[in-house]
Structure formats: C-alpha cells, structure tokens
Amino acid sequence: MRPSFILSLDQGTTSSRTLLFQDNGLVVAEANAPLPLVFPQPGWVEADGEALFASQWQAVQGCLAVAKGLPDWHIDQIRAIGIANQRETTLLWERSSGRLVHPAILWYCRRSAPVAQQWRELGLESVIRERTGLNLDPYFSATKLGYLFQTYPELLRRAQAGELLFGTVDSFLVYRLSGHQRHITDVTNASRTAFFDIKHMEWDQDLLSRMGIPEAILPEVVDTAGVLATTHPSWFGRTIPIASLVGDQQAALFGQGCHSEGKAKCTIGTGAFILAHAGSDLHQAPEALIRTVAWRLSGHAPAYAWEGAVFTAGALINWLRDGLAIIQEPRDTEVMARSVADTGGVVMVPAFSGLATPYWDPAARGLLIGMTSKTSRAHLVRAALESIAFQIVDVLRAMEEASDTKFSELKVDGGVAQNDFLTQFLADVSDMGVVRYAMAEATARGAAWLAGLGSGLWPSLDCLPTASLGEPTLFSPVMSSIVRLESYARWQRAVVRSQGWDLGS
C-alpha cells in the first residue's frame, strides 16, 4: 500500500519553508526560499506581498521537485495541506483581483505606535485586554490596519465599499491558492488581531466600530483543523484539501506535543515565543502576559494558552553578522561564546524594536553596558546569546506567577535553539530542564499533524506519529544558585536602564 503524505507550508518572517511529511511522521522532502524584508525607517519592517507569496510557492515547488525522487511517488498521494504562518503581519488586497494595495506590514513593525497611543487615550486599552486577551501594542494587527486607514483615506473608502480584503498571512495564502474562492482565517490567527473576542469566538463589533475598521474586509473564522478549503487545480494539477491553518507559535506548541494543560514550549527564531497550554477555561491573565487561542478542533472546546514574546532573538545574531560584522556565520557564535569564561561584565539588552513580555515598552532601546578596554568580540557575542536566554527567563517567571506553578521542563525548537551554548545557558538561568528533539521542525510538524487530523489521516491525538520525533536531548542546569541570582540581577538592572527612551529624540 502506497503511503499518504501531508504537505506542510511554513511561511516565516525571513523565509518560507515547505516540508512533506509521510504518514509515519517522517519528513521525506523539504525546501525553503528567502523572503527579503524592507526597513523604510528605524522600527519599520515590511515585505512585498507578491514576494511573500512567490517565496512560499518557490518552496512548494522545490519540495515537490525533491519528492519526485521518492519511490513510486505521485502527487495524488498528498492527503492534505497544512499551513503555519508568521502571525499579526497585516495584508490588504483587492477582492476582485487579489492584488495587494500596500506592502505587508510585518508583525514587529512599530510604525503604528502613534495609533496605539491614540486608542489608549480613547480608553480602549482595558477593553481590548478584557475581550481579546492582548495588550494594546503595535505588535498586533489592529493598530496596523488603523495606521493604513488613517494614513491612506482612499484605502478606508475602498474598504468601506467592500472592494478590499484584510488578512493575516494564512488568509492571504488561502485566498491565492483557492483561486480567490475562500477568504478565511482560523481562530489562532484571528486571536492575534486585537479585535477578536476569544470567549465568544467572533469578531468584536464594538471594537471594530471604535477602531474604524470595516467588518466587510474581515475573513470568515474557521476551526484550526478540518477541510477548510481546497486548492484551485491550476496550482497542483488537481484539487487538494487545505486541512489546517494555524499561527506558527501555536503550531509549534502542538508539534511539541504540548496537548495538555501546564506544558510549555519556546520557539527561538527571529524572535522568541513562549507558550504554555492553559486548558479550556479562559483565565484572566496578569498584565505582563497575553492570552491567546491555542487551537480549536472540530467538536471540541477551544484550547487556550499563556503567551509571552521576545522581539529580538535570532535577529540579534544577524545583527552581529550584518551590522557589527564580528561573526561570519550564526554558527560561529557558539565557539566564540565558549572561548571566554564569561562576558567580562558586559550586558546587552537587544531592545531594537522595544521590549515585549513582561515589560511591553515600545520606547525601550538597545543597550550595551559594562565594556572595558579588555572587552573582545567574544565577550560581545556571549553577552548577545545570554541576553536571549535572559529575555526568555523573564517570560517564564511571569508565566509561573500567573499559573502558580513551577514548570519542570521547557521544550525548545527553532533555528537558534540548535546552539548548544545558548540552550545550556537557558537551562542554567531558568533552573529547569530544557528539552530539544532531534526533529527540530516543530512548527511545520504541528501544521502537518493538525492537517492529518483535519483530513482524517490520523483519527485522534493518540494516533499521531510521535515516535518520529526521535530521541530528545536534555540540558540540565549546572550553574550555582549564587551565580544564577547575580547574573539575573545584573540583567534586570540593565533592562531598567534601557527603558523610557524618547522616540522623538
């Protein structure tokens, strides 16, 4: 009997990936393609929407080209497609043509900070937090749409006339792949907009009105898994069910096997995102954290998650290479960090786009402190890697306070998590075991598992091919409690000094 496959699309911040999962859970083909980003001003990040789609389609074609070398391969063996995507990134396009009317505004773009402040003065902050679980921050899609409609009145006019459509990346990909037949988003992506009521699982009419966002532009909200759409035959030569849509961080939570309350994961890529399964009851979160929808499977109550975000993780390593030119490749950082006993007193706070959890300070700016004439490149590199771990610990501490529990372990994935120095240092300063599976592609795996459930390839959670994860590597803390406390206190003092900068200065 020929095997079945799930084609998993993972559209990320700086690249698009496609992986082909066999029904035994193994990846048998994969490909990726870069996505160029544009930085028009400090703190602004955007991408050409056509380049975004082209990047993903190039990765699909590359993956299928590899698949042609498989024994007895035929495209008819693809049971379904799963899509995971960078979240909050905001796209606006014409209903009739699918043509984008503005570059995609990336999730960590800060251009809409004035809109967030304007809405704060109108008293929207507490309402947004209560109904959507999110903070009033430029991070989320609502302020990005507010920026577009306030800056370009013609776009608002066209939106009100029903000529334009809004979507996060999942919605845009499905609109294109379905031949403009389906304008949908799933509950995980909807929960990242800051105008979706996560209790009643619907767009919040009151918030939309007060934000000036026309309801006509919004996609239909669907489950995370199920036969949600089908591709147009022009793309694959046949129709293929699209059986999962899921935000990348929720996909990683699912792909890490965190299917029950109290389990946590951290994906370390461009940024770092920590999610902990919070069960099916909608708890009120402390101000430091956000609440989000983890997933909703057909016939089941939605699962929720606590979430914390670190804006600058892998992006910091890229800056060491491209901005400071003190490394040639990201992999160089591990050897350099180990070449010195410590940072020599140097602390780096990489608040390039402000600070996220638990500070939520868009005015914070990057800080490098403690240098002497003996500071070397290796000290800077080590301080950079340590800063990523410290930011993650900030989030974990806030989560433990919120849930009144101590996590026993943290599952990690993402490209930056392959750095053994960083992963060990994270175990040390968090004082918990850090688990990294040999099969690192948790985001794509989560989308594939969900698509397999949605298409009936695997009938239940118990049938998921978890054996394909391989043997985990466990990083256990070895740092003394005194060193841990002193180093973390030094980090917190540096964070205080990075905050409160005037954006206009």
Image (cartoon, helix red, strand yellow):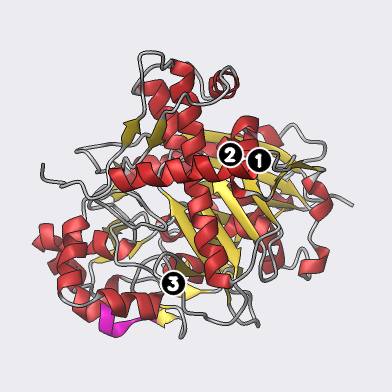
Task: Please tell me which residue lies in front, 467 or 346.
Answer: 346
Counting from the top left corner in percent of width and height, residue 198 is at: 45, 78
Is residue 196 rendered to the left or right of residue 425? left
Residue name at image x 41 percent, y 17 percent: 375
Q: Which residue is mark 1?
A: 480
Q: Quadrant of residue 399?
A: bottom right
Amino acid type, callout 3: Pro
Q: Which residue is mark 3?
A: 286
Amino acid type, callout 2: Val
Counting from the top left corner in percent of width and height, residue 318 is at: 42, 29
Q: Give the spatial CA distance, label 2 vs label 3.
A: 29 Å
In primary-sequence order, the first of circles 2 and 3 is 3
Q: Give the spatial CA distance, label 2 vs label 1.
A: 5 Å
Q: Quadrant of residue 349?
A: top left
Counting from the top left corner in percent of width and height, residue 282 is at: 52, 81
Task: Please tell me which residue lies in front, 352 or 443.
Answer: 352
Q: Which residues are magenta?
A: 203-207
Residue name at image x 42 percent, y 60 percent: 175
Residue 151 seen anywhere in this rendered image of the structure = yes
Q: Which residue is mark 2?
A: 483
User: CB under 8 Å between callouts 2 and 1?
Assistant: yes
Select label 1 or label 3 by which is in front.
1
* Secondary element type, mark 3: loop
Rendered image: mark on residue 242: none
Select label 2 or label 3 by which is in front.
2
Counting from the top left corner in percent of width and height, residue 92 is at: 28, 58
Amino acid type, callout 1: Ser
Is residue 311 rendered to the left or right of residue 215? right
